[in-house]
Image: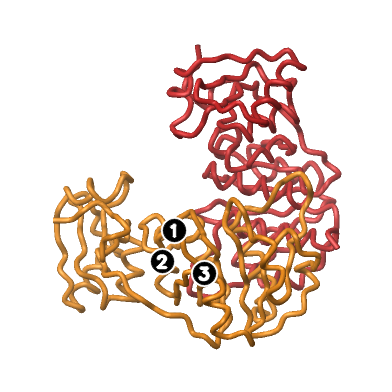
Chain colours: A orange, B red
Amino acid sequence: MVKKYKKELDVSYTLGITLTIEVLKQRNDLVNRVFIHSKTIKNESFNLIEELCNRNNIPLIYNDKVFNILSNKENCFVIAEFRKYNNNINELDNHVVLVNPSNAGNLGTIMRSMVGFNLNDLVIITPAVDIFDPKCIRASMGAIFHINFTHYNNFLEYYNINRARHYYPFMLQSSCNLSSIDIKSPYSLIFGNEATGLDDSFLRYGNSVIIKHSNYIDSLNLPIAVSIGIYEFTKNKFK
Amino acid sequence: MVKKYKKELDVSYTLGITLTIEVLKQRNDLVNRVFIHSKTIKNESFNLIEELCNRNNIPLIYNDKVFNILSNKENCFVIAEFRKYNNNINELDNHVVLVNPSNAGNLGTIMRSMVGFNLNDLVIITPAVDIFDPKCIRASMGAIFHINFTHYNNFLEYYNINRARHYYPFMLQSSCNLSSIDIKSPYSLIFGNEATGLDDSFLRYGNSVIIKHSNYIDSLNLPIAVSIGIYEFTKNKFK
């Protein structure tokens, strides 16, 4: 009836009540069905799910076994199955570019910050972690359903589409401090992978940026660095 | 010989080679012994561990079984056992105050950012997650060994010690935007728990602060909010 999640499947799952409400609100056109565990408490949130499903002709399926297959959390009692989708970036807007992100939780947390600061366009340079991994969806707290994203096989494939943008690669090799950066739009904020960051070749694209920190740590955690970067670039819009 | 980690034990563990090097460099006085798996590759990092142990008379113990007890990661081949310690905050310095933090990974990530921005004094209001949980140590990437920390049973117990400090509670109920805040030292940056944030009672302490964000998310992830706050308060020191 359902299969344990794998990247190759053409569906993914929202594990939990909050995420399920989010996908039903944002993308009900993609939802195949919603599974309900017999232990679900019929509270206000449950009534909302029932209402959203009824209104959109989405079947509610009572079945406890699927929870053993899809979730290893004990407190997950509602799951939506939805079809994976493409939701391409808007080329004229500001972008976050992640080069080879490798951790699903990190990718989800980054999307949560992006949506928090109204930066909704995400470029992913592959190889990369699966954006539809249920762990990624959970870490995004549903923000994924507000994100436009496009995958490219390498950075140049993205760069060559529009060289007139303003590129800001974040890297420890830079000498230009984030807090005194000159911000020009539309911009692309570029971040490397968790383990390696961006290599020296990125120094040639636009204006490289460093988030200066002490020598007592090797680097900031990736979602932290991305979020501080987005915060600094967008804060004048949140006065 | 060893027991699976529990909060009640008077020792904890660094799971992995990088963390083990960090505890040996920063706090070798606390290390009881270092366990080595037979699969350990004898590279430069291993040589450094061997050297640090020999210099400080710390036994290196070859034993594969302890890894099954202490670690569920397949690529963990070195573990240090160290005695838990107190390392009280400096009352005159700037502080981060976490009210009831509940997630070990989040607490570790926060310490990594703190040390990254030279803010090394952490106040924890209990109940709270165990700072010596190996998951917390791992998420800190070893930053924990640079942190001074003190636990208090409630916020007032901490507040009453020195009311002359400048208190900045971070909360969505505030109307004062982080990016235009007037910074006075010594300061205490106060953050609530992952699920609930700070309640209204904190509006009466010092100057409350909000990190403004869109309505498309309920809140920022806790380590993200703390790190953005620390970044803004310390960035003039990193010119």
Give x and y (percent) for residue B89.
Answer: 77, 38
Task: Examine the rendering and report whether any part of residue A118 can be seen.
Answer: no
- Which residue is painted at 76% across and 64% down in the image? A174
Crowdedness near tag 1: few (<14), some (14–19) or many (≥20) residues, C-alpha within 10 Å? some
Crowdedness near tag 2: few (<14), some (14–19) or many (≥20) residues, C-alpha within 10 Å? many
Circle 3 residue: A154
Q: Which mark is residue A108?
A: none
Please tell me whether mark 3 sits on a helix, a strand or a loop. loop
Give x and y (percent) for residue A79.
Answer: 26, 59
Of the image marks 1 and 2, the number of the one nearer the N terminus: 1
A152, above or below B186, in the image: below
Circle 1 residue: A129
User: Mark 1 to mark 2: distance in Å?
Assistant: 17 Å
Figure quadrant of the N terminus of chain A: bottom left
Give x and y (percent) for residue B78.
Answer: 57, 26
Please tell me whether mark 2 sits on a helix, a strand or a loop. loop
Of the image marks 3 and 2, the number of the one nearer the N terminus: 2
User: As drawn, is B74 to the left or to the right of A33?
Assistant: right
Chain letter, disc 2 residue: A
Q: Which mark is residue A142?
A: 2
- Which residue is painted at 20% across and 57% down in the image? A36
Chain letter, disc 3 residue: A
Discs 1 and 2 lie in a common subunit: yes
